[in-house]
Image (cartoon, rainbow, N blue to C red):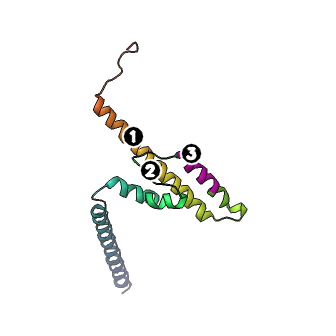
């Protein structure tokens, strides 16, 4: 009699566990399909949004700076505003850790945008100018 209850418990547990795994797989599949359709035009910008949680526009609004035009931005102005806002929101001085982290993420997002634009421009210059490897030290 006891073996019957144990067998039923094991079977019910296996069934519940199997359904949970199947449902998690369905959700992961739907999430990946949604991410592919949402990021169809520019996958790098959607990846940047996912990694930092901020769009470029949000980051510029947080720091109250203009968006980088053509990958160029006034980094001195951005760093000045970042330092001032970061210090004002210091938790030891009565500020908010949440706001401080948002300010940090905004600066990182703008820096990433500028860095990616610079890398793209450098790559474009290499492609346009041709590949010239440095084989010899005297040349």
Vertically, is 14 above or below 108? below
Residue situated in front as seen by the camera: 43 or 113 = 113
Counting from the top left corner in percent of width and height, residue 104 is at 56, 55
Give residue 3's mark: none
Magenta includes 122?
Answer: no
Q: Which residue is mark 2?
A: 68
Q: Which residue is mark 1?
A: 119
Residue 54 visible (yes or no): no
Q: Secondary structure under badge 2? A: loop
Q: Is residue 81 visible to the viewer in this orientation of the structure?
A: yes
**N-term-proximal mark, 2 vs 1:** 2
Q: Earlier in the sequence, mark 3 or mark 2?
A: 2
Front one among 60 and 29:
60
- x, y (%) of residue 5? 37, 84
**Is label 2 in contact with label 1 (beta carbons under 8 Å)?**
no
Q: Does 10 appear above or below 54? A: below
Q: Residue at x 34, y 82 (%)?
A: 8
Camera-near label (2 vs 1) is 2
Where residue 9 sits in the image (x, y, percent)? Answer: 37, 81
Determine whether, in the image, residue 134 is placed left or right of residue 33: right
Circle 3 residue: 76
Q: Is residue 82 magenta?
A: yes
Q: Residue at x 30, y 66 (%)?
A: 34
User: Residue 65 location, x and y as percent?
Assistant: 52, 55
Q: Earlier in the sequence, mark 1 or mark 3?
A: 3
Residue range highlighted in magenta: 75-84
Q: 88 left or right of 29?
A: right
């Amino acid at each position: 009699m006891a073996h019957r209850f144990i067998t039923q418990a094991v079977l019910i547990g296996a069934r519940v566990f199997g359904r949970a795994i199947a449902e998690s797989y369905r959700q992961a599949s739907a999430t990946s399909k949604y991410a592919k359709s949402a990021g169809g035009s520019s996958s790098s910008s959607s990846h940047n949004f996912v990694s930092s949680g901020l769009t470029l526009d949000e980051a510029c609004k947080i720091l109250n700076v203009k968006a980088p035009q053509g990958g160029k931005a006034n980094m001195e102005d951005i760093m000045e505003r970042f330092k001032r806002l970061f210090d004002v929101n210091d938790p030891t001085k009565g500020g908010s850790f949440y706001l401080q982290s948002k300010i940090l993420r905004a600066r990182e997002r703008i820096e990433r945008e500028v860095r990616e634009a610079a890398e793209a421009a450098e790559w474009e210059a290499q492609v346009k100018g041709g590949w010239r490897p440095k084989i010899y030290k005297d040349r």
